Amino acid sequence: MTLLEELNKLKSQWHRLPFSLPEISLTERLLANIETKPMLPPKPPVDLKAVHRKLVEANSNGSWSTIEPVEWRYASECLVMGQPPLLHDDSFVSAYLAAMRSFTSGGAIRRLARFYLVHFDRKVPGINRIASYLRENLGDCGIWAARHAQYQLFMPERAPESLSSAVQAQSDNPRRFLESIGFSGNLAGSGLTAEAFLLSCRTLQRQIENTDSGMDALSIQNMIEPIWNWATNDGKTFSCAGHRLAQAAFADALLLPWVNRAPPDDLQEFISSKLLSLFKDPRMRPSTWVSVQPEAKRVFFRWLTKASLEQFLGFVDIIVDPKHKAMWEARRRFWRAYHDQHFMQEAWVVFGNKGAWFAAKTANRGHSIGFSTFQSGSGSGSDPTQCVLIMRIGSLVVADWSHNGACHIWHESRPMAPKLYDPTYGRDALRSGSDFRQTHQGNWQREIANYIRAETNARPTRYL
């Protein structure tokens, strides 16, 4: 029997195999991993530290003939070495470029062009001098000569704007477009592409700001998607790492348009899920939000306050006893009034085991806002369905228990006042030493509202 016949026979009995085959083969998965890994430049065949020393000596004594041809080829990589880097020594860069005209080859010029793109910063005089040199030697710049003709790459004052406009015109997949014109591997995160990304973020911000408040959310989402595709690796990690402000610029672009207005609920949820998936909850991971503008962070904290309130309400909807539904609806209206009328500055939820499971489940649907849990075995009555909503209203910290617990209020200056955003809480810490305590019986709304108004002057116009 021939091999082909054996294969056909095996194919006909495929369903009888005692194992299942994966939908994607191991080879395909390995290939995908290779393709998504950044392309690293090959290790140079010269000692760059030694070349750096020879460049400094050549500039000092005015004799560049000691630099070997292979060393000229990799000399550009030495421009960022030293303290300060050679690139920031304008007299050195001038002498280096003058020597290149006499001693170097096309290969060295092409590597210099790549260096210029990777380390692009139009505020650095050395970069501007290199750009001028490259314009004079376009014939040795390889593919970058054609790209310069298209996008003015070696005109530092124009290149970021030109590249940004070209990328924005490719609305389907900006990263694929950049790869098609040569910006792949470490060039995908080059200084020039990062500058273009910053400009695109500012353009996106203006576009959102100029939209009619009644514009449908889908139209704004369509504006955001191309920049999102450029900014991320498959929506999981931030990829525009060529500039320290790139990540912050993306967050600013999505949040600053909403300083003085509110987006539709579905658009707010769309933007929140994007930012949370990349940068996490700033209440738990503030380090990833350091460079984001304060106004933008305030917008997001406002949204997260509402999200935490709804997270608490959503879980209690599930676990509340049917006979307590009426009482719970009153509590829902009460705390929403404080939020909707801008008296509630912050909110945070502490869950028992069942609530933590609920929060994790909703996070799988893209609502990955932070929350805390009770310390194991803390306090009495470890009900796994119990949860607490901690709020800051003016100078007060309020802890309202979901069930089998009262509403407790502290002045935030009190040592016993709970801090928001701790990773875990003891149950007793959320009900001990409070300045005010009110059970959810009788006219509890009036009692709590009167205390809050007396201490903060916060007075919702309606909550019943």
Image (cartoon, rainbow, N blue to C red):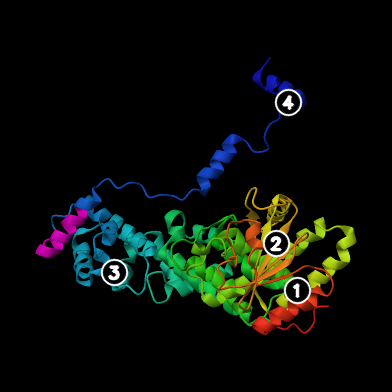
**Relative image position of residue 83 (x, y in whole percent):** 24, 63
Find the residue positioned furthest to the right.
323
The part of the chain drawn in magenta is 51-63
Which residue carries the number 1 mark? 336
For the N terminus, which image quadrant? top right
Q: Amino acid at mark 3?
A: Tyr
Tell which tag, 3 or 1, sits nearer the viewer: 1
First of labels 2, 1 by sequence position: 1
Q: Residues within 10 Å of mark 2 (few under 14, many from 20)?
A: many
Which residue carries the number 3 mark? 133
Which residue carries the number 2 mark? 388
Using the rendered view, name the quadrant where residue 342 is placed: bottom right
Observer-nearest of 386 and 238: 386
Q: CA distance from mark 2 to mark 3?
A: 65 Å
Observer-nearest of 108 and 295: 295
Observer-nearest of 295 and 412: 412
Question: Is mark 2 in CB contact (under 8 Å) with mark 1?
Answer: no
Q: CA distance from mark 4 to mark 2?
A: 59 Å
Q: Residues within 10 Å of mark 4 (few under 14, many from 20)?
A: few
Q: Residues within 10 Å of mark 3 (few under 14, many from 20)?
A: many
Placement of 179 over or under 224, stated as above or below: above
**Relative image position of residue 411 (x, y in whole percent):** 61, 74
Observer-nearest of 377 and 278: 377
Q: Secondary structure at mark 3?
A: helix
The residue positioned 41% from the left and 60% from the top of the image is: 143
Q: Which mark is residue 11?
A: 4
Q: Is residue 358 visible?
A: yes
